[in-house]
Image (cartoon, rainbow, N blue to C red):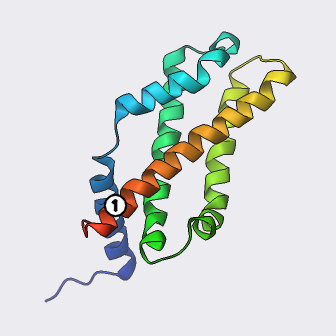
């Protein structure tokens, strides 16, 4: 008797395998350094310790990295980065909003600071999306996917 597997199970396993392989190229020290460089001015308004905010921000950066790596296959097949950014815009916006709302919830910053906080959250997610995109595209070019 044969084991029956569905397409979704096979697709899920393939995606998890790809994510594990691409995460090997991600540097946790780089994530922490980037977080510290961008968000240090906002620590004075934080109600939480730096470690709790850092952990959540790094989780979102990892998600952005994986999202970029996932969309890198379109770049490998010749699609322009602008059209790829449009494809992933919704998911990317959701990550940016999640990070910004988390910061907003755990801080007491004045309204003037919120605009720069939004910009920092946007830059943080964009940077790690692009990093994931470049690493994923490199893996596809080297046929390591």
Q: Look at the image and tell me in which quarter the C terminus lies.
A: bottom left
At 52% across and 27% down in the image, what residue appears?
35
Left or right of 113 on screen, residue 55 = left
Would residue 10 be seen by someone viewing this image from the given angle?
yes
* Label 1 SS: helix
Residue 114 x, y percent position in the rendering = 79, 27
Residue 81: x %, y % from top left: 56, 65
Residue displayed at 65% across by 36% down: 121
Quadrant containing the N terminus in the rendered view: bottom left
Residue sitting at the far right:
111
At 66% from the left and 66% from the top, the residue drawn is 86
Residue lying at the far left in this picture: please name it. Answer: 1
Q: Residue furthest top?
A: 44
Rendered residue at 42%/56% (across/down): 134
Q: Nearer the viewer, residue 19 or 77?
A: 77
User: Which quadrant of the view contains residue 101?
Assistant: top right
Residue under numbered circle 1: 138
In the rendered image, the vertical position of residue 96 relative to residue 7, given as above or below: above
Q: Residue furthest bottom?
A: 1
User: In which quadrant of the rendered view does residue 7 lie?
Assistant: bottom left
Residue 48 placement (x, y as % from top left): 60, 15
Question: Would residue 104 appear left or right of 111 to someone viewing this image?
Answer: left
Nearer to me, 92 or 102:
92
Badge 1, how many Cα within 10 Å: few under 14, some, many 20+?
Answer: some
């Amino acid at each position: 008797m044969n084991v029956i597997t569905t397409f979704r199970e096979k697709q899920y396993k393939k995606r998890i395998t790809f994510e594990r392989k691409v995460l090997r190229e991600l540097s946790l020290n780089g994530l922490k350094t980037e977080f510290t460089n961008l968000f240090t001015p906002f620590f004075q308004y934080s109600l939480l310790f730096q470690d709790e905010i850092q952990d959540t921000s790094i989780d979102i950066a990892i998600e952005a990295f994986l999202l970029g790596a996932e969309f890198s296959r379109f770049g490998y097949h010749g699609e322009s980065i602008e059209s790829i950014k449009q494809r992933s815009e919704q998911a990317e916006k959701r990550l940016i909003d999640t990070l910004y709302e988390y910061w907003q919830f755990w801080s007491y910053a004045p309204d003037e600071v919120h605009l720069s906080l939004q910009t920092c959250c946007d830059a943080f997610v964009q940077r790690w999306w692009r990093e994931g995109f470049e690493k994923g595209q490199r893996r596809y070019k080297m046929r390591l996917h």
